[in-house]
Amino acid sequence: MAAHSSRPSPPPHIPMDALSEILQDFRLSGVNYGRCELRHPWSIEFPQQSLLRFHFVGQGPCWIHTEAEGWQELRDGDLALLPQGIAHRLASAPDVAGGSLDDCRVTKLGSNVCEVVREGTGATSTLFCGSMALGACALNPLITLMPPIIKGCDVAGNDPVVGPLLAAMTVEAAQPQMGSATILSRMADLLTARLIRCWVNCTGASTTGWLAAIRDPHIGRALAAMHRDPGHNWTLESLASLAGQSRSIFAERFSAVLGEGAARYLARLRMQLARELLGQNGLSVAEVAARLGYDSEASFARAFKRITNVSPGVVRRTIPGRMDMNFGL
């Protein structure tokens, strides 16, 4: 479909899970973490950002405030997931005035882990927080469908692993040892992925849209393949073969569920990824074009401008590189 790659198609008999393919982005997109020890009274404001965020409470007190939900208490062992990175505030109590990270001492512990300390005289709150820059993440279509905040305790009853995982994180956060930050980050990745999957499973069935597509046993296979290897020379025939359907039935079903054809979907996916790649230091337009399977920089540039209405060169000059360390906050 416009681009070309010499890589072979995956064997059509291998079953593919669209959600599993898409959830792989958690480890590939670079997650930043912060282990926080904050003494009452404390409060931190978080502006709206294009970040998926979570806050895990090892030991309270801790409250979270969003415009839509107001104040909610986060108890020991609970986790708040904010898929769309909406503006919110964390505090030791609802009546504590707003503050920022500038009020804290931040120490970098590793390439993507920091320690955040707020001195004071009151009770100490221990939090483990994380953020993932979404950019052109393949999760984006799913993220836009999710509620602004999901609490781990609210879905624990629907997933037998969530409760024990929250308990294990509580123990690790309360008794930090060598490697605790890395262990917590791995558990947080797993927990976030399971919360997303649990939400998908608990959401009412729909017949159209992206959520319906990843659940569809045929369309889901094609989506998984495109997200796993967007630079491959996918054709309607090869995607239909993966889906186990005829070309005409697959094309009709894909358009009916997603509201656009497979070629258009693939082109938009490639351009979303292109915007992300163009923001990375050292990658030229030609290198991005090659990575996404285009035969020439010119053909890639035409496709990019057709879909985004700007040239890749303009995007490369205006989009900053990967986000600086934000301490998981």
Image: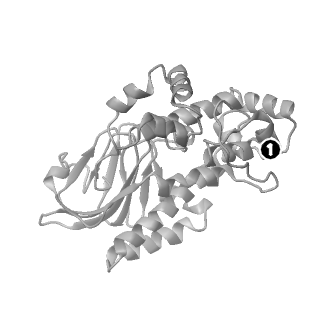
The residue labelled by disc 1 is: 243
The answer to whether one can see residue 204 in this image is no
SS type, badge 1: helix
Position of 182 compared to 261: left or right? Answer: left
The residue closer to the viewer here, 174 or 29, is: 29
- Tell me the residue at 32%/55% (across/down): 328
Mark 1 Cα shell of 10 Å, populated few (<14), some (14-19), many (≥20): many
Where does the image place residue 270, in percent across and percent down from the top left? 56, 36
The amino acid on which the numbered mark 1 sits, given as a three-letter code, is: Ala
The residue closer to the viewer here, 28 or 139, is: 28
Where does the image place residue 326, in percent across and percent down from the top left? 28, 51
Count of numbered circles in the view: 1
Position of 327 compared to 286: left or right? Answer: left
Above or below, 194 against 149 in this view is below
Above or below, 121 against 271 in this view is below
- Tell me the residue at 54%/29% (across/down): 300
- Tell me the residue at 40%/69% (across/down): 184
Position of 55 compared to 302: left or right? Answer: left
Q: How is the image coloured?
A: one colour
Where does the image place residue 80, in percent across and percent down from the top left? 42, 54
- Tell me the residue at 62%/52% (across/down): 21
Above or below, 27 against 214 in this view is below
Where does the image place residue 266, in percent across and percent down from the top left? 63, 34
Residue located farthest toward the right when viewing the structure as drawn? 246
Res 314 → quadrant: top left
Q: Quadrant of the N terminus?
A: top right
Res 50 → quadrant: top left
Residue located farthest toward the front when viewing the structure as drawn? 296
The answer to whether one can see residue 236 in this image is yes
